[in-house]
Amino acid sequence: MLATRLAPMPFELATARLELGLWQEADAGWYQGLVAERGDRPPTIEEAGAKVLELRDDMLMTGIGILPIRRWQEGDSIGYAGLTIGRTTLEEPELVVELLRGVHGQGTARKRHPS
């Protein structure tokens, strides 16, 4: 079966509290901390900078990807969310969310139930 070209997901999303947007080189610092929280060897700031630009470029190429989550009021980044190929295909992407430990339990990633 031939792959169907899907419309790209939005590269920017916003709510009253949060904004998701394309990766920027300035995201390297908090991304470095997120990797360290996993228990992995944290990348150097240069490696983290290269990684966030790779994530951005991959999203622009495939039309799906993960986006940094920024809080409007606090002006900080708290993790990422989005779609990734992961163990599947572009036609059936996986949803991923990863937040810094400091924001766990604050209702940031609440699951919204349909009314």
Image (cartoon, rainbow, N blue to C red):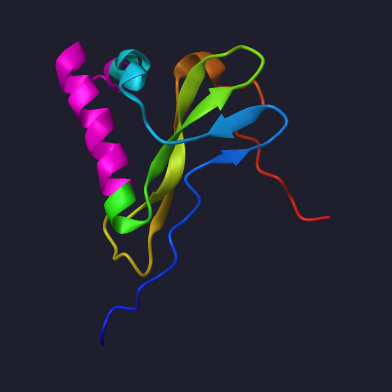
Reply yes or no: does residue 26 show up in magenta.
no
Q: Which residues are magenta?
A: 34-59
Indicate left or right for 44 with 3 as reference: left
The quarter in which the N terminus is drawn is: bottom left
The quarter in which the C terminus is drawn is: bottom right
Seen as rendered, the residue at the extreme bottom is: 1
Instruction: Give the residue displayed 53% in from the left and 24% down from the top.
Output: 70
Q: How many marks?
A: 0
Q: Is residue 85 something that shows in the picture?
A: no
Instruction: Give the residue displayed 15% in from the left and 21% down from the top.
Output: 47
Instruction: Give the residue displayed 62% in from the left and 29% down from the top.
Output: 18
Q: Which quadrant of the structure image shows residue 106?
A: top right
Reply yes or no: does residue 46 show up in magenta.
yes
Q: Position of residue 110 (x, y in %)?
A: 65, 36
Indicate left or right for 112 with 35 as reference: right
Instruction: Give the residue displayed 45% in from the left and 66% down from the top.
Output: 7
Q: Position of residue 74 (x, y in %)?
A: 61, 11
Q: Is residue 4 something that shows in the picture?
A: yes
* Up-down relation of residue 14 to residue 104 (above or below): below
* Up-down relation of residue 72 to residue 87 (above or below): above
Indicate left or right for 10 with 50 as reference: right
Q: Which quadrant of the structure image shows residue 104?
A: top right
Q: Position of residue 35 (x, y in %)?
A: 28, 22
Q: Main secondary structure of the magenta part?
A: helix
Q: Position of residue 28 (x, y in %)?
A: 30, 18
Q: Please state which of residues 51 and 79 is positioned toward the viewer in this rendering.
A: 51
